[in-house]
Amino acid sequence: MRIVVLAGGIGGARFLRGLKQAAPNADITVIGNTGDDIHLFGLKVCPDLDTVMYTLGGGINEEQGWGRAEETFHLKEELAAYGAGPEWFGLGDRDFATHIVRTQMLAAGYPLSAVTQALCDRWKPGVRLLPMSDDRVETHVAVTLPDSGSAEGPGERKAVHFQEYWVRLRASVPAEAVVPVGAEQAKPAPGVLEAIAEADVILFPPSNPVVSVGTILAVPGIREAIADAGVPVVGLSPIVGDAPVRGMADKVLAAVGVESTAAAVAEHYGSGLLDGWLVDTVDAESVTRVRAAGILCRAVPLMMTDLDATARMAREALTLAQEVGEA
Amino acid sequence: MRIVVLAGGIGGARFLRGLKQAAPNADITVIGNTGDDIHLFGLKVCPDLDTVMYTLGGGINEEQGWGRAEETFHLKEELAAYGAGPEWFGLGDRDFATHIVRTQMLAAGYPLSAVTQALCDRWKPGVRLLPMSDDRVETHVAVTLPDSGSAEGPGERKAVHFQEYWVRLRASVPAEAVVPVGAEQAKPAPGVLEAIAEADVILFPPSNPVVSVGTILAVPGIREAIADAGVPVVGLSPIVGDAPVRGMADKVLAAVGVESTAAAVAEHYGSGLLDGWLVDTVDAESVTRVRAAGILCRAVPLMMTDLDATARMAREALTLAQEVGEA
């Protein structure tokens, strides 16, 4: 069975670990979000690709869900001592190696997809990990920052890099707009459209529907390829009980005018793209609404509390995909 | 008193610490060797400048004489896990920060002299540290590597970067030639010629006469400025008892046809450049030979066993300079 998964960072990576347990013989291709990539200290950092690679390769910091296990932060301390910013992004000493190798390979002319494959040669994630695009796409968030001069005065409206919004500001101000800068000109990375065309099932893990899955879908050709693939497309709601399972998805959902409910996210993807949708048991009453939107829906436990629970979620998604196929 | 010191790495840095104690009110300008600079992992590494900066700024690993105190090597371990070489150059996690900041500033268009000043803003070495040149100069060593194929066959003659000769090969094969590639086209960094012209004394610490002091002198204009400065130029022998005090200076002295003795090094600099020369007490018999070459000479203890001993050496050098001036 060939499965294609569109993945963001932590949520996508953890779901993939469950999927590997649920379908150990499946041929899994992961299309990773690169919209939250950022250049820091002259280095190219790909947080979502790395989270998937480290999580599936056994190198992740399990507690925080990102970054490396047994990490130290001496380099970062020294950069701060030099006054070299930003200090709000937590790059560890071990993690830096990934960014240095990636940056060197990019400088030598390799595309990001080839670099990602080379990095995965070490980590052996057990899936084929593809960046959504070799072209630069950078998610920016429009915000109004409080005016530090006067409490009365108007705030400063500006666009900040997604990482600045998410990590530095901790999504503490409303996201007024989310723009995947460069997406319109981006091409899917080599292998992306082929993997979609050859897939038996396409899954949307409980990743952020706006800045993770949404950004991947914003690369021209990917949404169309999924809609035209003619195979079941099944998603898992990242919203449980009207709140994101983790992260701050509600903040960016508001920016695109979508309420933070499991049903609203399904409607946001729409029946033109999505065939099946899993909501958590606490959201069982939303099943009717999702079905009314033309999307097969079932309520099952959606908390990735441990690997077994996550594998059960993946199995439920594959079962729903089978039902879609038979329907 | 304005003192100009031409410095390599460990020997020069330790001497400077003694000089600062010996002449606490002196205005010291250090012209640092950059011929052993190397690009590693896409980063610009300046070993000699950093050794001076860390030593005088209190950040040096005292035991090994280079690199940072309380250092860890997690990034290097990870680079090795990726198969990203070279592994023979020991870059620590804290040390990496210096190279990252330097590389970013160079990429932003700052010359090395401005970058060095910015780095020193943090370290406050208590001297003015100038690279010999803002232009790229890279010391290469011609060697014949043993032929791994056949014991009979001819070896492979090639030029290797000085760091490869020194650190990877540990000077285990003869240096057939030492070439400061790019030196002929290099210009002294801003401030270098001015500092020499305004100096009251110019000192050559017990640094390597070929690949440290020799490389600095190879930058067109510097040797001439020193010879024309009209102030005492005094050096301290890096050779004690026919062997280098530390390092492998004898290996590269052979390449330029100079024997490893205190007197031969003085003659190599020559009376056109050098006015005074300190040899160790074990080399007292060479004093006559050095004086015969037209260079004032005295035998004093030259082992930098601790800071006080080093300060005594610096005081002897300044005393000899005074005698040169009175002669």
Image (tube, coloured by chain):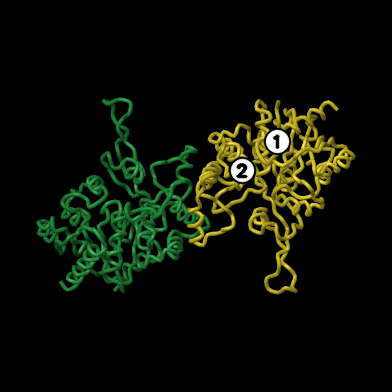
Chain colours: A yellow, B green
Above/below status of B293 relative to A199: below
Mark 1 chain:
A
List x then y, in percent, for residue B200.
27, 71
List x then y, in percent, for residue B234.
22, 64
Q: Nearer the viewer, residue A191 or B78?
A: B78
Q: Circle 2 — which element?
A: helix
Based on the displayed image, in which of its 4 quarters is residue B311 positioned? bottom left
Q: Which residue is mark 2?
A: A51
Q: Nearer the viewer, residue A70 or B273?
A: A70
Which numbered dot is residue A5?
1
What whole-number distance in Å separates the C-alpha atoms at marks 1 and 2? 15 Å
Based on the displayed image, in which of its 4 quarters is residue A15 positioned? top right
Which of the image's four quarters has the N terminus of chain B? Answer: bottom left
Which of the image's four quarters has the C terminus of chain B? Answer: bottom left
Name the residue: 19% across, 64% down: B276
Decide: few, some or many residues near mark 1? Use Cα within 10 Å; few <14, some 14-19, many ≥20.
many
Q: Amino acid at mark 2?
A: Thr
Which numbered dot is residue B181?
none
Mark 1 vs 2, N-terminal side: 1
For this view, does A27 lie left or right of residue B246?
right
Q: Circle 1 — which element?
A: strand
For this view, does B148 lie left or right of residue A125?
left
Same chain for labels 1 and 2? Say yes or no. Answer: yes
Q: Amino acid at mark 1?
A: Val
For this view, does A257 lie left or right of residue B196?
right
Furthest-right residue in view?
A292
Q: Nearer the viewer, residue B188 or B32?
A: B32
Decide: few, some or many residues near mark 2? Use Cα within 10 Å; few <14, some 14-19, many ≥20.
many
Any part of residue A130 in sight: yes
List x then y, in percent, for residue B140.
34, 45
Based on the displayed image, in which of its 4 quarters is residue B293 positioned? bottom left
Mark 2 chain:
A
